Amino acid sequence: MCAFVVFVVLVYKMWGIVPLEFARTTPGKAVGFMFIPFFNFYWLFPAIWGWTKDFNSFLRQRQIDSRYAPEGLGLAIVVFWVVGTFIGFISGFAGVPLLGLVIGLPNAVLIPLFIYQVCTVLNDLPIEIREATLSSASQPPQISGPRGYGIASLVLGILSIVIPYLGLILGIVGIVLACKQRKIYKEGLSQAGLITSIIGTSVWAFLITLMLIFVITSAVL
């Protein structure tokens, strides 16, 4: 789980370096939409592979002499991720739950390699380019302020989706922290935290409601 949170934060930082005119999405949406059930099978492609294409387009059009992002590696990670997860769902019903894990196993090597290459690519950017893109990236200019609530809301939002039942409480807390952060200083992490927290809260509220209805109906009958 910690490794996944680190990867999600990296995705946010990746999109933060791409100027608005070259980016197909914002950092907050790139992260938040990854947690929308079923839609995320599609969204992983623009969020990860799409970033490599947009970043490289930015380098080419600005004629920046720097390393290019690994487009092929980004695409491979998404394909193994999506196919492995999809087959894992199907094989789970067929009594072979480990099949999806086996198919997705190459990502145990590919994802750390991708993280290393992305960090290398970003660090290779001339410092004046990094500063210029970060100041104008994906977000409209805002007054600077503390971001602790935004980070906490994102972490709680992710946990609210994956932790059974308790995720309802975590999601509610995540929503409160995201809203509090946005009152202090609006930035992408709070947007991503708000999206993930709403998803986690909605999913577990729906499931808990169904469970209560089933229990009450069974008791009456």
Image: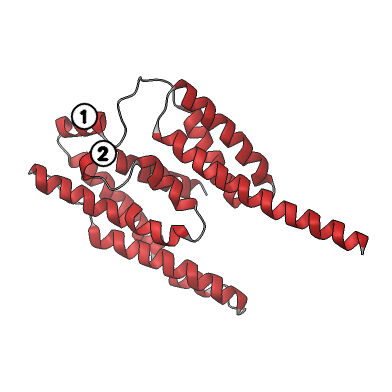
> Which residue corresponds to the image point at 18% horizontal and 41% vertical from the top-left?
124
Q: Amino acid at mark 1?
A: Glu
* Percent position of residue 69, x then y: 22, 52
Question: Secondary structure under badge 2?
Answer: loop
Question: Secondary structure under badge 1?
Answer: helix
Q: Is residue 161 above or below residue 20?
A: below
Q: Which mark is residue 46?
A: none
Q: Circle 1: is it few (<14), some (14-19), or many (20+) Cα within 10 Å? A: few
Give the mark nearer the N terminus: 1 vs 2: 2
Toward which corner of the image does residue 66 lie, by quadrant?
A: top left
Q: Nearer the viewer, residue 98 or 139?
A: 139
* Percent position of residue 142, x then y: 34, 23
Residue position marked by numbered label 2 in the rendering:
17
* Percent position of residue 146, x then y: 44, 22
Q: Nearer the viewer, residue 218 or 35?
A: 218
Tag 1–tag 2 contact (CB < 8 Å): no
Toward which corner of the image does residue 78 lie, by quadrant?
A: bottom left
Q: Circle 2: is it few (<14), some (14-19), or many (20+) Cα within 10 Å? A: many
Residue position marked by numbered label 1 in the rendering:
131
> Which residue corresponds to the image point at 61% horizontal and 76% vertical from the top-left?
93
> Which residue corresponds to the image point at 45% horizontal and 57% vertical from the top-left?
40
Locate the C terminus by quadrant: bottom right
Q: CA distance from mark 1 to mark 2?
A: 9 Å
Q: Amino acid at mark 2?
A: Ile
Task: Determine if residue 24 is in view.
Answer: yes
Left or right: where 162 falls relative to 13: right
